[in-house]
């Protein structure tokens, strides 16, 4: 038996509706039968419905053509089978490394973001999508060359909403 990762955390008291959202940005492994045996995913699964998990295999979804798809998919399915909510990760900004600092350089191509949402929807059984690096008001004002931030996110929300309806 696997012990929950936060057994004394107050939200784990019976009757509490509070959940812990965990960004599971690590690798996945499977045994010879294709079952997830990644210890960190197993620990999250042990917490069951008290935990919501963001899976991030490659700063976004991977599709069946990717060699790691079956491994990540098995671990995500184990989480779902344990009543965890599972969210797919989507980055919404472009960035590059300058020395030891990540510098954001613009909004990700909207068509790429939409394709990420469609891929998560088509190839994964998810509770939802986690949009990371969402633009703040100061960036929208300081970086007008990045375009209309509100319109950008409205388009993303629309595709998320439409794929959820399918």
Image (cartoon, rainbow, N blue to C red):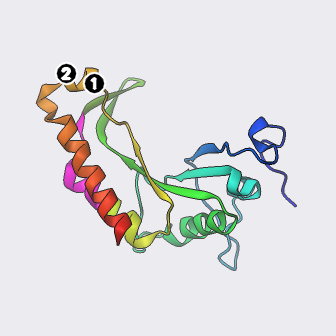
Say which quadrant the N terminus sits in: bottom right
Q: Which residue is mark 1?
A: 137
Image coordinates of residue 16 in percent, x first then y, are 74, 44
Residue placed most toward the observer, 154 or 90: 154
Q: Horizontally, is 76 left or right of 38 in the view?
A: left
Asked if the magenta segment contains residue 70, the reply would be no
The segment highlighted magenta reads: 106-115
Residue placed most toward the observer, 48 or 23: 48
Q: Secondary structure at mark 2?
A: helix
The disc label shown at residue 119, or none: none
Q: Secondary structure at mark 1?
A: helix
Rounded to the nearest whole Å, what is the CA distance between mark 2 and mark 1?
6 Å
Q: Quadrant of residue 163?
A: bottom left
Residue placed most toward the observer, 155 or 147: 155
Residue drawn at (33%, 59%), measured in percent from left and top?
Answer: 161
Q: Horizontally, is 17 left or right of 24 in the view?
A: right
Q: Residues within 10 Å of mark 1 (few under 14, many from 20)?
A: few
Q: Is residue 105 visible?
A: yes
Image coordinates of residue 115 in percent, x first then y, are 28, 61
CB under 8 Å between callouts 2 and 1?
Answer: yes
Image coordinates of residue 154 in percent, x first then y, are 24, 46
Residue drawn at (11%, 29%), measured in percent from left and top?
Answer: 145
For the view shown, which residue lies furthest in the right direction?
A: 1
Residue drawn at (64%, 58%), measured in percent from left and top?
Answer: 84
Asked if the magenta segment contains residue 113, the reply would be yes
Q: Residues within 10 Å of mark 2 (few under 14, many from 20)?
A: few
The disc label shown at residue 141, or none: 2
Q: Horizontally, is 53 left or right of 68 in the view?
A: right
């Amino acid at each position: 038996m696997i012990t929950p990762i936060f057994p004394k955390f107050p939200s784990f008291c019976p009757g509490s509706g509070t959940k812990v959202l965990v960004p599971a940005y690590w690798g996945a492994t499977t045994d010879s039968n294709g079952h997830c045996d990644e210890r960190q995913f197993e620990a999250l699964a042990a917490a069951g419905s008290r935990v919501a998990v963001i899976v991030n295999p490659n700063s976004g979804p991977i599709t069946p053509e990717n060699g790691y798809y079956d491994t990540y998919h098995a671990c995500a399915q184990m989480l779902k089978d344990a009543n965890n909510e599972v969210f797919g990760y989507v980055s919404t900004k472009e960035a590059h490394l300058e020395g030891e600092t990540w510098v954001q350089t613009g909004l990700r191509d909207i068509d790429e973001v939409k394709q990420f949402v469609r891929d998560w929807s088509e190839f994964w059984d998810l509770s939802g999508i986690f949009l990371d690096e969402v633009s703040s008001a100061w960036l929208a004002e300081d970086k007008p060359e990045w375009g209309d931030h509100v319109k950008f996110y409205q388009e993303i929300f629309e595709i998320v909403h439409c794929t959820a309806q399918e």
